[in-house]
Amino acid sequence: MKPPDACRFLENKTWFLGPAPAGGEPEGTRPLSTPFWCLKTHEPIGPDGDLVDDVCCNGERPCFKAQVEL
């Protein structure tokens, strides 16, 4: 589950791959360069040009959007 203070555009790639079968990676996949991606760019780099992850995708970035607008 995504932390409540994470950006709404932060996504974890492993949620889509599922667990690896015993003895290796899921068929038809390649090693992940980073487990996170941005839903705006569809890459591990955000719209501001910085890396995407669960620590740095916070309110200090100009592209950050809260999951729930208050």
Image (cartoon, rainbow, N blue to C red):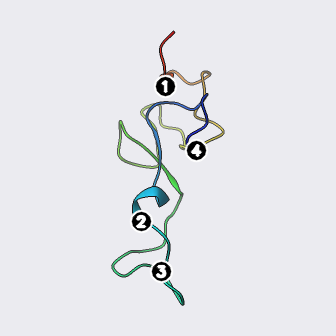
Residue at (53% x, 57% y) in the render: 35
Spatial separation of the CA atoms under disc 4 and disc 3: 22 Å
What residue did someone put label 3 on? 25
Spatial separation of the CA atoms under disc 4 and disc 1: 15 Å
Q: In this view, does 8 lie to the left or right of 5?
A: left
Compare marks 4 and 2 and give the one earlier in the sequence: 2
What residue did someone put label 4 on? 53
Camera-nearest label, 4 or 1: 1
How far across and down, in percent of the image, does residue 63 sit?
47, 25
Residue at (35% x, 36% y) in the render: 40
Task: Verify CB contact (< 8 Å) between mark 3 and mark 1.
Answer: no
Q: Residue 57 is drawn in which quadrant? A: top right
Task: Verify CB contact (< 8 Å) between mark 4 and mark 2.
Answer: no
- Which kind of residue does numbered mark 1 sit on? Gln
Spatial separation of the CA atoms under disc 2 and disc 3: 10 Å
Q: Which element carries disc 2, helix, strand or loop?
A: helix
Q: Which element carries disc 1, helix, strand or loop?
A: loop
Camera-nearest label, 4 or 3: 3
What residue did someone put label 1 on? 67
- Against 6, residue 18 (above or below) is below
What residue did someone put label 2 on? 17
How far across and down, in percent of the image, does residue 36 sit?
51, 50
- Against 14, residue 67 (above or below) is above
- Which kind of residue does numbered mark 4 sit on? Asp
